[in-house]
Image (tube, rainbow, N blue to C red):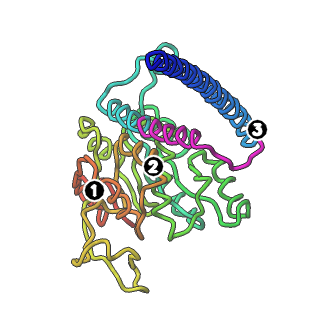
Amino acid sequence: MQSKGSSVRFTGMVIRSRISTLMLSMFATFASLYVAGRLWQDAENRVYLAKELDRITGQGKTVMSVDDSWKIIECREQQKKLSGLEMELAAARQEGFVSKHLSEINGTPKRRPLVVVGVFTGFGRKSNRDAIRKAWMGTGATLKKMEEEKGIIIRFVIGRSSNRGDSIDRSIDSEKKQTNDIFVLENHVEAPEELPNKTKLFFAHAAEKWDADYYAKVNDDVYVNVDALTNVLTAHLDKPRVYIGCMKSGEVFSERGQKWYEPDWWKFGDGKTYFRHASGEMFVISQALAKFISINRSILRVYAHDDVSAGSWFIGADVKHVDERKFCCSAWSSGALCSGV
């Protein structure tokens, strides 16, 4: 009797074990189906949300997903890489590596300009411009001949009036139409305190408009010996990143109200002396540096003075500083490039 009872209990345990296994398998199956259903539903929701995002952003609303944020970051990284490649391309061109697909006129490759000279001028200074036209710049056919034979492009550089479209702007437009030698910075408001930004915009836009070896900034009270300028620049064509000028330093004025007051004086240390930079009367930079300014214009800092600002853009870069005393325009002397008046 005891043996028979034990056999019955063992059989019952086996049956219960099989039922438990079957129930566990069914539960696992239902759980898998549930999870798969949720995943499918989530996928459908993602598709729906993506479509809604496209629809909403298409209506001009500012809704952005995490995925779109990552896409923007990736785009910015690609933009940085592109900027680096553009800098390398500009340096290569400066060293003489020019595309064989240059535009040709009557089968002859177009000659690259040696230098674009920006003569900085302002409102009410037409007499200065006329004096420069007569003294060393030329007009009409003479100006065109200088561009074609010497590779020197000269333009007066000026911004717009704070009252856009007023009589001052119309006067400049009229003069530009008559002489065809004025380069208007459309997005710049002409003002003395905006000269550092004007300098930055000139180099940026000039590099985009003209494919030249060099870009020069000159004041409209300076007379230039064009032939001497050509000789000096030609001697430095082997340098891909070069900054040429009458190098100087000077005191940083920290007292508000002083003529040369520098709001950011504290950045120049306890000695209150500017780093070495080219005098603002006249200086030249190579194409690679002009491209550098063009690419990074939105983050390049400006200080109270245009010459200090330009020097600050190159102080931390791999740039050859050339202290050319012929660019010191304080007095005209034999072999000098320029003379201030």
The one nearer the camera, 221 or 252, is: 252
What kind of element bears circle 3? helix
**Which mark's residue is nearer the viewer, 3 or 2?**
3
The residue under label 1 is: 315
Earlier sequence position, callout 3 versus callout 1: 3
Q: Residue at (45%, 49%) from the top-left corner?
A: 203
Tell me the distance, in whole angstroms, between the alpha carbons under discs 3 and 2.
41 Å
Q: Can residue 142 be seen in this view?
A: no
Q: How many C-alpha atoms fall within 10 Å of the one at disc 2: few (<14), some, or many (≥20)?
A: many
Q: In the image, which residues are magenta?
A: 59-81
**Percent position (x, y) of residue 67?**
57, 39
Residue type of the residue flagged with mark 3: Arg
The residue under label 3 is: 55
What kind of element bears circle 2? helix
**Which mark's residue is nearer the viewer, 3 or 1?**
3
Residue type of the residue flagged with mark 2: Phe
The one nearer the camera, 196 or 227, is: 196
Q: Residue at (55%, 23%) from the top-left corner?
A: 16
Q: Is residue 261 visible?
A: yes
Mark seen at residue 203 = 2
Earlier sequence position, callout 3 versus callout 2: 3
Marks 3 & 2, CB-CB < 8 Å contact: no
Q: In this view, does 78 lie above or below 277?
A: above
Q: Residue at (40%, 21%) from the top-left corner?
A: 99
Q: Residue at (41%, 76%) from the top-left corner?
A: 263
Q: In which quarter of the image is the C terminus?
A: bottom left
**Percent position (x, y) of residue 196?**
45, 63
Q: How many C-alpha atoms fall within 10 Å of the one at disc 3: few (<14), some, or many (≥20)?
A: few
